[in-house]
Amino acid sequence: MRLTLATTLVMQAIGAGHCHGFEIVDVTGYPTGTVYPALRRLERDGYVRSHWEAERTATREGRPARRYYELTASGVTALDAALHTLLKLDAARLRPRTAP
């Protein structure tokens, strides 16, 4: 799977410890209509796994239950590859052009 910039940033947010949907939305700056479909695709493709927190915890804190996401080993590998590609693109952008 080729990762888009948005998907890469969603994965990067999860890897940095931002583990539930609204937190990922806040960190990436992407709308929920971008983040949640990306999370579903990432989980379907095996890059992310998720679990629901205990209903008791959410009730005690007066909010709906959160779904927490974490990268799988394949997700870490895919994220590393995507970040490597972005770094190469950035390095190429900074290189002066040579005359043809």
Image: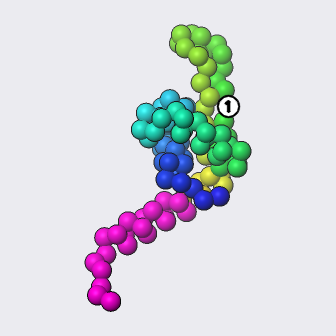
From the viewer's side, name the closer residue of 5 and 52: 5
Q: Is residue 5 magenta?
A: no
Percent coordinates x, y for residue 69 in the rendering: 61, 37
Total numbered labels? 1
Residue furthest out toward the bottom: 100
Residue at position x 42%, y 67% from top?
89
Residue 18 in the image: above or below residue 84: above
Percent coordinates x, y for residue 5 in the rendering: 49, 53
Instruction: Look at mark 1 in the image and give the residue it sits on.
Output: 51
Q: Is residue 22 visible?
A: yes
Residue 55 in the image: above or below residue 38: above
From the viewer's side, name the closer residue of 57 and 37: 37
In the structure shown, which secondary structural element does the residue marked by tag 1 occupy?
strand
Residue at position x 30%, y 80% from top?
97
Label 1 environment density (alpha carbons within 10 Å; few <14, some 14–19, many ≥20): few
* Magenta stretch bounds: 81-100
Q: Amino acid at mark 1?
A: His
